Amino acid sequence: MSKKALSDLAPSDLAGHTVVVRADLNVPVKDGVVTDDTRIQASVPTLRLLIGAGTRVVLLSHLGRPKGGREPKYSLAPVATRMGDVLGRPLRFVSESAGPAARDAVASLAPGEVVLLENTRFLPGDEGNDAGLAKDWASLGDLFVNDAFGAAHRAHASTSGLAEAMRAKGGLAVAGLLMAKELEYLGGALDRPEKPFVAILGGAKISGKIDVIEALLPRVDRLLIGGAMANTFFRALGLQTGASLVEDDRVEIARATLAKAADRILLPVDCVVASDIAEGVATRVVERSQVGSCDRIGDIGPATREIFAREIAGARTIVWNGPMGVFEVGAFAEGTLAIAQYMARACDGGAVGVLGGGDSAAAAEKAGVVERLSHVSTGGGASLEFLAGAKLPGVVALNEAD
Ligand code: ADP
Ligand code: MG
């Protein structure tokens, strides 16, 4: 990685310092309780390192999408509680996002203590990338650690703005352990994949992922396509898709993509169809040329699973984004869960397998394979933009490695 990382710093660079950490603690909260703490857990290694090094830690994060003002349902207070449980000791919480209350709390921190400030997006200047706000946050410490990969594709005051403000006053802005891991795995797959390199794309739409297809195609040996995305490609082949989800305005792009790389793209050969995508419906397996006018395609079929299994088993690098079907509904989950198993098996055998995307991560969780995959990205939109070759502002703004 070309950016300076927290792991590059010596203990003496840290001890006694006050570190501003931007984490991605954007977790689901219901009735004041965190319902999935994956992102909290993922942020803990950086915090433990800083606590162990005797730094004072000022922790920043956004949660949800408040409209530039205080909204109680987006308070980080429940996150503070859960973070305290995970760290094994309570951490301080300040119900202001910046300003004098934050400054006072930071001034009273002892080495090894953590204070979490309220949701950065309660201040409109965060998303507005307000330079004054970034400077205010930078003034709270003398080192900035950006660990919020999931927010790195946004140029906000608490991400790129804060990094720039910290560097402007002579401090370092470095990647946290999670950020570095994300960049290492996603970047490694793109820049120096061990071959064969197989990418698997699925999910609801082509439109959000056409850039990913374009960026991956020249690098991969095989691109396996499933999910509703495959339906649009079916139409490009002149096949009927019945009542399935199709993006009519993307059929041309799909046709052009196939024309460029038909030898590397594998589409499903069969599908699981039903009259409705709902729990308990009667399903049929049909060849892709036999989809009826009232059919909805909900999953890849067994023959496709076998073809994809072989490709994945032979791969040394695998990148997967997007479910193969409507895995939230039992009758259409098999394709996605099978792919998760094939990928886990490949990783058991030494392949590097990287998974990106919020729904895909949920599918891997459902399949029980998360621990066996090389890396499950915590950043949905950010990982997609990264795979599409975009420069992420939250990364760009960090110091270069020596
Ligand atoms: P990710 O969050 O992993 O990037 P997406 O958001 O792109 O994935 O796509 C996930 C959604 O795609 C899931 O909700 C799933 O139900 C839907 N999907 C997958 N296959 C189909 C299909 N054949 N028809 C309709 N929806 C589908
Ligand atoms: Mg999604």
Image (tube, rainbow, N blue to C red):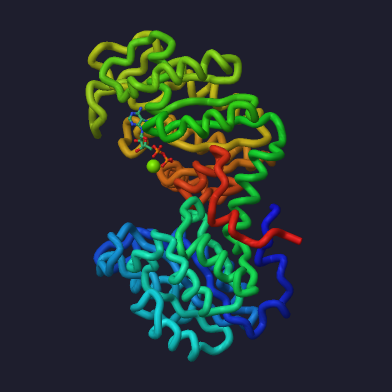
Q: Position of residue 154 (x, y in %)?
A: 46, 53
**Number of marks:** 0
Q: Quadrant of ligand 1?
A: top left
Residue 41 appears anywhere in the view: no
Asked if residue 62 is positioned above or below residue 330 in the image, the reply reads below
Q: Position of residue 157 (x, y in %)?
A: 46, 64
Asked if residue 376 is positioned above or below residue 387 in the image, the reply reads below
Residue 240 appears anywhere in the view: yes
Residue 347, quarter of the rendered image:
top right
The front one of 84 and 329 is 84
Q: Residue at x 45, y 19 (%)?
A: 254
Q: Position of residue 38 (x, y in %)?
A: 45, 58
Asked if residue 52 is positioned above or below residue 289 in the image, the reply reads below
In the drawing, does residue 106 fall left or right of residue 185?
Answer: left
Instruction: Tell me the quadrant of the picture where the C terminus can be found.
Output: bottom right
Q: Residue at x 41, y 15 (%)?
A: 234
The front one of 79 and 23 is 23
Q: Residue furthest right?
A: 402
Q: Position of residue 257 (x, y in %)?
A: 51, 19
Q: Residue at x 49, y 16 (%)?
A: 256
The front one of 91 and 65 is 65
